C-alpha cells in the first residue's frame, strides 16, 4: 500500500520543484526593475511624529512611517522615496509650517531657473532639492524638485509665494514687460488728467480757496489724491462762505428798505401836521371876524 503511494508523492514534489524554479526565474528577470525597500531612522526635535506622518501623507511621499519612542520615526520606502522622505523630515522639523506648491509641469523642468538663481532672489533662504539638501547657515530653507510629475516648491507659505512670483517672471518675461508698459501708460494718463484738473481748479478758485490751497501746499508733502480732495473741499467752503455773504446782503437790504419806509412815513406825518394846524387857525380867525 505504501509502495503504491510513492510515485504520487514523487510527482507532487516534482511539480512543486518546477513551480519554484519558474518563480525564481521570473523574480530574477524582474530583479533589476524592483527597488528593494530601505530603512531610515529619523529622530524629531521640533515636531511630533504624528505631525511628521501628516506631512508625508499631505505631500504624497510613498513611504511607510512607523512611530518609535521617543518621538522617532522608522521610514521604509524604495531608494528614491526614502531620500525624499528623509529630506522632507529634515526640512519640516522646525517651528514653522510648511506647504507644497506646484510651480510647473515636470516637462518644463529644463526651462526653470536654477536653484542658485532662485536663491539669489530670496532674503536669507537656502534652496536645495531632495538629493542635495539646502545648506545650513541661513534663516530659512526651501526644497525645489520634481515630484509626482511636477516641479514643486516646499517651504513656508511666504517663501513659496516669492518663489512662484520669480519663476513666473522668469518664464514669462514678455507678459511681465507688457504689464509694466500698461502700468506706465496708465500712470502717465493719470498724471495728465490730474494736471488738467489741477489747472482748472487753480483758475476757478476764489481768494478763500487759494489761501487754503497755499496752506496745504506749504505743509507736509501729500499725495495727488489728498491734494485734489482738499482743493475740492476748499472750493466748497468758499462757495458756502459766498452764499452766506449773499444771504447777509439780502437781509441787510431788507432791513434798510424797512427803515427807509419807516422814515418816509414819519416825515409825511410831520409835514401833514403843520398844515392841519394852519387850517384850523384860519378858521378861528374867520369866525372871530
Image (spheres, rainbow, N blue to C red):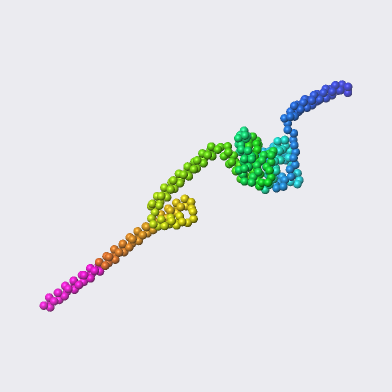
Q: Quadrant of the C terminus?
A: bottom left
User: Which residue shows up at 49% across the image and 43% down it?
Assistant: 184
Residue 20, above or below 69: above
User: Which residue shows up at 65% across the image and 43% down it?
Assistant: 126
Residue 157 left/right relative to 239? right
Residue 35, above or below 182: above
Q: Main secondary structure of the magenta part?
A: helix
Residue 112 left/right relative to 214? right
User: Which residue shows up at 76% across the image and 27% down it?
Assistant: 28
Residue 63 in view, yes or no: no
Residue placed furthest toward the bottom: 288
Residue 68 vs residue 9, the one in the foreground: 68
Magenta-colored stretch includes residue 269 = yes
- Residue 45's spot in the image, x, y percent? 72, 47
Residue placed furthest toward the left: 289
Tally of numbered tags: 0
Residue 187 in view, yes or no: yes
Magenta range is 265-289
Residue 179 vs residue 49, the one in the foreground: 179
- Residue 287's spot in the image, x, y percent? 12, 76
User: Which residue shows up at 64% across the image and 39% down it?
Assistant: 115
Magenta-colored stretch includes residue 282 = yes
- Residue 231's spot in the image, x, y percent? 43, 53
Residue 214, above or below 281: above
- Residue 275's spot in the image, x, y percent? 18, 71
Q: Quadrant of the N terminus?
A: top right
Residue 72 vs residue 107, the one in the foreground: 107
Amino acid at each position: 500500500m505504501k509502495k503504491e503511494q510513492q510515485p504520487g508523492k514523487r510527482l507532487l514534489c516534482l511539480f512543486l520543484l518546477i513551480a519554484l524554479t519558474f518563480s525564481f526565474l521570473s523574480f530574477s528577470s524582474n530583479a533589476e526593475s524592483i527597488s528593494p525597500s530601505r530603512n531610515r531612522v529619523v529622530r524629531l526635535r521640533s515636531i511630533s511624529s504624528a505631525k511628521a506622518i501628516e506631512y508625508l501623507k499631505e505631500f504624497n511621499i510613498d513611504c511607510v512611517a512607523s512611530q518609535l519612542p521617543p518621538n522617532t520615526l522608522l521610514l521604509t520606502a524604495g531608494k528614491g522615496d526614502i531620500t525624499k522622505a528623509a529630506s522632507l523630515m529634515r526640512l519640516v522639523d522646525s517651528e514653522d509650517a510648511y506647504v507644497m506648491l506646484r510651480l510647473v509641469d515636470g516637462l518644463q523642468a529644463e526651462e526653470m531657473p536654477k536653484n542658485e538663481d532662485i536663491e539669489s532672489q530670496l532674503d536669507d533662504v537656502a534652496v536645495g532639492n531632495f538629493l542635495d539638501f539646502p545648506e545650513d547657515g541661513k534663516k530659512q530653507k526651501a526644497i525645489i524638485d520634481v515630484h509626482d510629475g511636477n516641479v514643486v516648491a516646499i517651504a513656508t507659505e511666504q517663501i513659496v509665494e516669492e518663489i512662484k512670483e520669480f519663476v513666473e517672471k522668469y518664464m514669462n518675461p514678455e507678459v511681465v514687460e507688457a504689464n509694466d508698459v500698461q502700468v506706465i501708460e496708465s500712470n502717465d494718463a493719470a498724471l495728465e488728467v490730474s494736471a488738467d484738473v489741477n489747472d482748472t481748479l487753480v483758475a476757478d478758485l476764489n481768494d478763500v480757496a487759494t489761501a487754503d490751497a497755499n496752506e496745504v501746499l506749504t505743509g507736509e508733502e501729500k499725495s495727488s489724491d489728498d491734494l485734489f480732495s482738499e482743493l475740492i473741499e476748499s472750493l466748497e467752503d468758499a462757495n458756502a462762505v459766498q452764499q452766506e455773504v449773499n444771504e447777509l446782503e439780502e437781509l441787510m437790504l431788507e432791513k434798510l428798505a424797512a427803515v427807509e419806509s419807516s422814515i418816509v412815513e414819519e416825515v409825511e406825518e410831520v409835514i401833514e401836521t403843520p398844515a392841519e394846524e394852519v387850517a384850523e387857525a384860519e378858521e378861528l380867525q374867520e369866525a372871530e371876524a
